Image (cartoon, coloured by chain):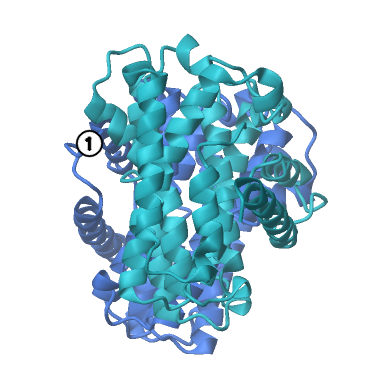
Chain colours: A cyan, B blue
């Protein structure tokens, strides 16, 4: 496959998978007419704001890499997207990062007000756990394995994971931050949830222990590469492409990889992580091609 | 037992149970020295702010009423208290009820700022699910039953339960509210979590179906009675006793039972609910005495 063919093929895969995830999310989320409607409108506004669905797509791809099936992991995959969306809604609040735009649209609190935005985030987080415990949707899954997934996802999303990262990020604004703190923020804020997405896909599909370990390593590396690529985009992209304010990290004096090491060194670091992630996938057959393609192109994306 | 004996005996029981719950919460929550410390300080500040631990106590009492053991349900009981605490932290925020005091102390955001308060609430909600999925603490519990409890708790806490009630409450401020809306708010904001506390205690202890149904009915009734008693206290108590601003419901033009029906009719309604709750307990033996005592005195409390 040439480079261009691979891009086309991944583009097609991502488009198809996004459609599958979007349909599933739509079926799992309550209709906007449910009482009281504003909370359901607010939840849906942010869930259907054009996200790439990276976490659910990785979860499904990990399941397929270990010979599992999409249907088995779809509820947990969508729960991971709900958790990601709740974190964006809360991060954008005036009391946190105070962002007015995301993906080209006004942020949740700009449309619904701070109170409803907080509650919509709370509701998405809670619904994520509700969805992960729906046995009627996951009859083929081992109950103990499902409990393990709930335990791992809650840990990755909580104060030892994503929330811990956001706290450190919030406190680092305007302060001099060292490499260790920056690493803590990245590992916890982004990598933890990406890594657990892959683990969940493998666990629910009864992947072997060595496969689970390899996917975990792969997830850590592309999670960090993804965050570095994001920070470079914040500097280099345009508002039209990115759909949010450009240079907002710099403006807030936020610590990032490019700010600490410069763009070139950051790009090199991201490239090394991708090579490492590909090496982690060596034990897998052709079923893992989307995971390989995602690693290759994660640093090439434009938005 | 005379009335005074019963009060003394319940007082003693509640004090002992509160100590058990407090010790368990302390052991389940991360130490305040964990990095980044501010989030753990903030979580602990509100968890250990002198709450009555009504929900965990009801969970344990329900377990004991169906011949179960305290140790079996303690993690889930504490998770319910974490969910209750998160909801108080978020409700008190300026974007919501904007309260400066709770239980005689400044509210979480007055001490830690809005951003950390939002994250501390998020973290407590997430940790609650983490705790409920910890198999190492609940080896004696059936896995499928535990998944059912997680499903029921998330539903009671989410947009079909507590969050739905808070949204309706938020939107009713300053507006003319009818009895139906007021009932929706009470049922969802308070009753749902109280009722599921009793169900969780029974489910985890393998209570019979008829016992589960009776405890659910009991929970609905005392949950509503508790809310009505709370609203009466808001009008009649003093700041020193209640530890928060008195008459704050009236000031915000919040719809309450006493505002809609007057204090006397509200008191009568609460009394009827308690009688109904006691009738629901008829099938239980003397193991259910704390549940009976709690129903009797829920409307007599001073704070």
On screen, residue A124 above or below A92: below
Report whether A169 appears left or right of A245: left
- Residue A173, given in percent of the width and then of the height, sits at 38, 17
Q: Residue at x 29, y 35 (%)?
A: A184
On screen, residue B32 above or below B55: above
Subunit bearing disc 1: B
- Residue A32, given in percent of the width and then of the height, sits at 79, 49
The answer to which quarter of the image holds residue B60 is bottom left
Q: Which is nearer the eye, B110 or A267?
A: A267
- Residue A137, given in percent of the width and then of the height, sits at 62, 75
Secondary structure at numbered mark 1: loop
The answer to which quarter of the image holds residue A170 is top left
Q: Which residue is mark 1?
A: B35
Tell me the quadrant of the picture where the N terminus of chain B can be found.
bottom left
Tell me the quadrant of the picture where the C terminus of chain B can be found.
top left
Residue A269 visible in the snapshot: yes
The answer to which quarter of the image holds residue B130 is bottom left
Q: Which is nearer the eye, A156 or B195?
A: A156
Dot 1, crowdedness within 10 Å: few (<14), some or many (≥20)?
A: some
Report whether B176 appears left or right of B104: right
């Amino acid at each position: 496959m040439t480079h261009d063919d691979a891009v086309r093929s991944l583009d097609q895969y991502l488009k198809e998978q996004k459609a599958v995830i979007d349909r599933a999310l739509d079926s799992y989320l309550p209709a906007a007419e449910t009482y009281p409607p504003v909370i359901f409108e607010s939840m849906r506004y942010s869930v259907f704001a054009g996200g790439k669905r990276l976490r659910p797509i990785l979860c499904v791809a990990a399941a397929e890499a270990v010979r599992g099936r999409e249907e088995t992991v779809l509820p947990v995959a969508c729960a991971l997207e709900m958790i990601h969306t709740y974190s964006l809604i809360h991060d954008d609040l005036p009391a946190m990062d105070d962002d007015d735009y995301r993906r080209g649209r006004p942020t949740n609190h700009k449309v619904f007000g701070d109170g409803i935005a907080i509650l919509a985030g709370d509701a998405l987080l809670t619904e994520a756990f509700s969805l992960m415990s729906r046995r009627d949707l996951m009859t083929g899954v081992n109950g103990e394995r499902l409990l393990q997934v709930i335990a791992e996802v809650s840990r990755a999303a909580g104060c030892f994971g994503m929330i811990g990262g956001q706290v450190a990020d919030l406190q680092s604004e305007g302060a001099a931050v060292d490499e260790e703190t920056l690493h803590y923020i990245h590992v916890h804020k982004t990598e933890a949830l990406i890594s657990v997405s892959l683990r969940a896909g493998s666990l629910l599909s009864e992947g072997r222990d060595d496969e689970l370990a390899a996917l975990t390593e792969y997830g850590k590396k592309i999670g960090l590469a993804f965050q570095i690529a994001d920070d470079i985009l914040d500097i280099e992209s345009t508002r039209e492409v990115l759909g949010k304010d450009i240079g907002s990290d710099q403006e807030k004096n936020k610590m990032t990889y490019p700010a600490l090491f410069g763009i070139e060194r950051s790009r090199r670091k991201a490239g090394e992580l991708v090579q490492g992630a590909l090496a982690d996938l060596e034990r897998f057959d052709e079923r893992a091609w989307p995971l390989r393609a995602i690693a290759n192109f994660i640093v090439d994306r434009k938005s």
